Amino acid sequence: MDPKIGWYQPEQLGPAKDLWLNIWETGKELDNLNIRPQPNNINNNNIADASSTTSPVQNHQTHQPANSNPTMMRNASSSTTLTSQQDYIPLDNVNKYPNNSSDSNGRLSHPGQTTSNYYNPSKRKRENRASTYAMNDNYKQLVGVYGGCPWRIPHKTYSKGVIGLHEEIQDFFLYMCPTVEEHNLRLRVIKRIEKVIYDLWPESQVEIFGSFRTGLYLPTSDIDIVVIGLWTNLPLHTLERALIDENIVEPSSVKVLDRASVPIVKLVDKESEIKVDISFNMNNGVKSAELIKVFKCQYPALEKLVMVLKQFLLQRDLNEVFTGGISSYSLILMTISFLQLHPRNNVNNPDVNLGVLLIEFFELYGKKFNYVKTGIRVKGGGTYISKEEVQKDMVDGYRPSLLCIEDPLTPGNDIGRSSYGALYVKESFEWAYNVLSQAVNPLNTLVNDANKQSILGRIIRVTDEVVDYRIWIKRTFPATEPELPSSSTGSEASTLSAPASESESECSRGNSPNTGEKSEERHKDRHIFNYQHPHGHLPYKKTYKPSAHGNHHTRYHLSRDKY
């Protein structure tokens, strides 16, 4: 099982799993002994052993002192054992600091917060609070406090099978939608950055796009800002220095990508640790966000499916192109195409079964879609097109990518052109389809009861660190009247002035089965359960911030194409 994609399901646990897992890990260690380079002292001993076969007398005279030292030989054997360990490092083996204590960098540790010691750069990104990499070995550290399914309402009776999955998706959407405190905090960050920009360039225009504009952002999503103005050379470094001087960011938490295809300033807000991407003179982002809002009105199920799918990719580090995944914009266009070409006519009905749609989405893009020959087009009602047809509109020298998605705003532009890890996303979708289709099977009475075991929780988990971060925001930045950023005027103000889960301006939410007059009362028990720490868990603290600023350009990742 790929530790990046999945984990053991409850019915897989037991003595048989432990036995075969032990056999598999033992075989893996034996294989690593053959393929991994050995330490220098071991190589020297091997040379000595090899020389003994040709000249016993010479070996006795030259290497006798080394071979006669049993302590050195034991150390060499221990070094060989360490070299042959597994690819990941379990948190239990390296967490030297007990709960509520400080490590060597002065950072406080508490249950649910993972230290960066176990981080393997080739496997898990430590800056991703939502990552569930290697959860089989780190279950307690990742979801041991809240269980990984905080969206489930206590004492609520869920239906069986696919209807129970539908109910869980509804609750997941309501739980992951931003709270008033989270939304206002983002407005506060935007306003501070806007002030710096307007002080530098009073004639410029600041626009917000991406997931914050569309309302499809997760608790750890970044904010996308575009600055429109007239410059001979883009003032990336000027903005960087101004943000540092105004104490909005730490010097180590801001990075300028001036050689990228789209120059951008990446930063992490010092006060809230919210990630922000700032680009210049890129109007397509705003237009794309408005297009997505149109499709949200047309398909009420779109936003709920997208929130689930974004979390699914985020926790597997597949939510960004440069880390081997796909962009959020690509994911949304794939979902729109799925709904446009769905054979049933009720997909634009607010009461459509979300569980069925989610499984069918995984089936389409995980098992049936032909990535080699087929491209996706959403404009004009949506259709599948051959890649040969797409190439006719492309600039000479460019070819359609594996995941070919035609840009609905710019003909000839392939949205998925940089998604080199699309097949890895396909593999994760296929795994999710197999898991969910078995879990909702009416004949599989052992696992299709959502009251005994979360069905959605078989493929999605929310880590304790994310829950703690939301609790910390709620307590540190209590809700007040939102102050609109100066870039929000007219019709945009209604979207930015209220959280996505509470805004009445979204045409699809008023008739959604997830909302209603009794919505707040309906979920009162869940909010009490989530925010009063029944487990005695400490509130979220920015305990790792001092070390984070020491190397922020590797700790935090930001994506410009998040919607």
Image (cartoon, helix red, strand yellow):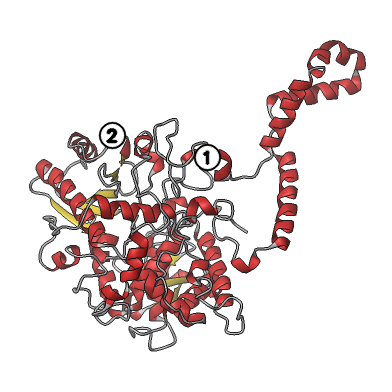
Residue 95: assigned label: 1
Residue 254 located left or right of residue 54:
left
Callout 1, which amino acid?
Asn
Q: Residues within 10 Å of mark 1 (few under 14, many from 20)?
A: some
Q: Choose between 382 and 389: the one closer to the eye.
A: 382
> Percent position (x, y) of residue 536?
41, 53
- From the viewer's perspective, is the residue at label 2 or at label 1 nearer? 1
The residue at 22%/52% (across/down) is 477
> Percent position (x, y) of residue 223?
27, 54
Q: Choose between 333 and 46: the one closer to the eye.
A: 46
Visible residue check, residue 111? yes
For the C terminus, the quadrant is bottom left
Q: Choose between 368 and 230: the one closer to the eye.
A: 368
- The answer to whether mark 2 and mark 1 are in CB contact below 8 A is no
Q: Choose between 424 and 112: the one closer to the eye.
A: 112
Residue 46 located left or right of residue 357:
right
> Percent position (x, y) of residue 196?
14, 43
> Residue lying farthest left?
202
Residue 25 located left or right of residue 307:
right
Q: How many marks?
A: 2
> Percent position (x, y) of residue 83?
67, 36
Visible residue check, residue 391? no
Between the residue at mark 2 and the residue at mark 1, the CA separation in whole angstroms equals: 29 Å
Residue 251: assigned label: 2
Callout 2, which amino acid?
Pro
> Residue lying farthest top?
61
The residue at 10%/62% (across/down) is 489
Vertical arrangement, residue 508 with respect to residue 252, above or below: below
